[in-house]
């Protein structure tokens, strides 16, 4: 049986990790090599991968796959990318050790304990599409910095964490002071925060900054994925100031020139002047005039997921947001964010109530942003930008968004 589409994939990854825990250095190295064959034939997409089997063995497994279980899906079979793409810089073990040491010393100077992990990931992905004689190679080198500070005071433990990534170590150093100061402030707020009074629950003005703002748009992006059974409908208005782009060319850590299905990278506008105009798509989720370009996943059925989600900044200052709100909840760090029960649900690590020029740290509350009123929820967008790097379904994602003032419901 002839394959109509056969992609032979070879994924290599080398990781060097330097950790500093309680003054003790740990160094670890690992390498990974995985081969995969991905095929599409007669409306059926299949994948087989292995660390020790060759392509012919993997291909034979796909030939034995039961076709009667397929859903007869269409494959958007145009515009295969070819050539090589490289991004990032090489980082040696000594440089990782220095980065971990500097970060750890900054925590100690602030009077907190913790652990720091600096890792260097060097990956290469090779594609060969048999039917079209296409070869495409991506080389990506990225440095990640995990910081997990904690402190104990009066028998209470406070802990927090951050994950930062960059294509160059200098970019991490440039942001390091602000990152550490933000983490230490999170710890302080946790230690002095009082439980939120349930009597004051209900509708509030909420200022979301730090990682909280990108996290909101991350959850919105889930509702703009082409394979989601429940999506926000095209044409829904989120407020005329909202503009959201999936931008592979933004100078962030996840720049690219093609996705995991070899579709060429392009800037996809998802929300324009508040109106939803497009969804994230793979080759198997497109319809009508839609285009693919957001496939994530080499060894599974690819899922439409953003690489770099960029939200256009606004023209508000933080002081203006506080003045307009009169009484507001300010959230910078979150423990969890999710979509459920008609809300975007945020659980802050700690938050601050701003009222009558007084700031009061508080805890034990949830922020619920109603999906049914998105057109009136977003009040203002600030001039600043907040970046967030995280993992979603084992895939790294990067988001940039301004601080936002929203209408939300607070519950305990």
Image (cartoon, rainbow, N blue to C red):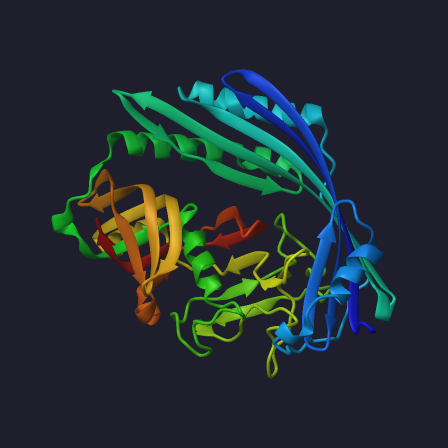
Quarter of the view holding residue 350: top left
Q: Is residue 8 left or right of residue 195?
A: right
**Residue reaching furthest top?**
23
Against 10, residue 96 (above or below) is above
Position of 168 with respect to 277 (left or right) is: right
Q: Residue furthest right?
A: 133
Pinpoint residue 332: horizontal percent, then vertical percent.
37, 44
Count of numbered labels shown in the rendering? 0
Q: List x then y, in percent, for residue 310.
A: 53, 58
Indicate the quadrant where residue 284 lies.
Answer: bottom right
Most extreme residue toward the left is 199
Above/below status of 329 relative to 120: below
Residue 120 in view: yes
50 and 311: which is toward the camera: 50
Can residue 8 be seen by looking at this rendering? Answer: no
Residue at point 51%, 76% (across, down): 277
Residue drawn at x 15%, y 48% is: 198
Residue placed at 33% from the left, 57% from the top? 405
Question: In the picture, which quadrant includes the N terminus?
Answer: bottom right
Q: Nearer the viewer, residue 35 or 269?
A: 35
Residue 360 placement (x, y as % from top left): 22, 38
- Image check: 132 left or right of 296? right
- Residue 124 location in percent, x, y? 76, 47
The residue shown at (42%, 67%) is 241
**Position above or below: 363 against 259:** above
């Amino acid at each position: 049986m002839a394959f109509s589409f056969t992609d032979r994939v070879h994924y290599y990854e080398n990781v060097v990790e330097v950790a500093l825990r309680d003054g003790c250095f740990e160094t670890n190295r690992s390498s990974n090599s995985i081969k995969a064959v991905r095929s599409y034939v007669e409306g059926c997409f299949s994948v087989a991968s292995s660390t020790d089997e060759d392509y012919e063995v993997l291909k034979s497994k796909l030939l034995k796959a039961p076709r009667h279980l397929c859903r007869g899906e269409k494959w958007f079979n145009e515009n295969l990318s070819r050539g090589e793409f490289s991004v990032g810089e090489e980082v040696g073990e000594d440089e990782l050790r220095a980065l971990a040491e500097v970060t750890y010393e900054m925590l100690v100077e602030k009077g907190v304990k913790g652990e720091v992990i600096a890792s260097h990931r060097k990956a290469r992905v090779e594609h060969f599409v048999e039917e079209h004689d296409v070869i495409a190679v991506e080389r990506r080198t990225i440095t990640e910095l995990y910081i997990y500070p904690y402190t104990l005071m009066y028998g209470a433990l406070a802990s927090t964490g951050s994950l930062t990534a960059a294509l160059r170590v200098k970019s991490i150093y440039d942001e390091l002071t602000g990152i550490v100061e933000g983490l230490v402030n999170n710890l302080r707020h946790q230690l002095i925060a009082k439980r939120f009074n349930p009597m004051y629950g209900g509708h509030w003005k909420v200022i979301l900054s730090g990682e909280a703002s990108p996290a909101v748009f991350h959850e919105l992006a889930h509702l703009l994925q082409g394979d989601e059974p429940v999506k926000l409908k095209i044409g829904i208005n989120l407020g005329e100031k909202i503009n959201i782009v999936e931008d592979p060319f933004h100078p962030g850590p996840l720049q690219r020139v093609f996705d995991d299905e070899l579709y060429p990278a392009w800037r996809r506008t998802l929300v324009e002047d508040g109106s939803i105009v497009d969804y994230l798509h793979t080759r198997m989720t497109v319809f009508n005039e839609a285009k693919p370009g957001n496939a994530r996943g080499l060894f599974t059925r690819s899922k439409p997921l953003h690489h770099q989600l960029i939200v256009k900044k606004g023209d508000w200052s933080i002081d203006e947001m506080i003045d307009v709100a009169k009484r507001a909840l300010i959230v910078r760090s979150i423990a969890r964010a999710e979509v459920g029960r008609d809300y975007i649900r945020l659980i802050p690590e700690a938050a601050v109530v701003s009222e009558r020029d007084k700031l009061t740290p508080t805890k034990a509350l949830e922020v619920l942003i109603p999906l049914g009123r998105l057109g009136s929820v977003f009040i203002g967008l600030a001039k600043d930008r907040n970046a967030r790097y995280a993992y979603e379904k084992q895939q790294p994602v990067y988001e940039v968004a301004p601080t936002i003032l929203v209408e939300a419901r607070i519950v305990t």
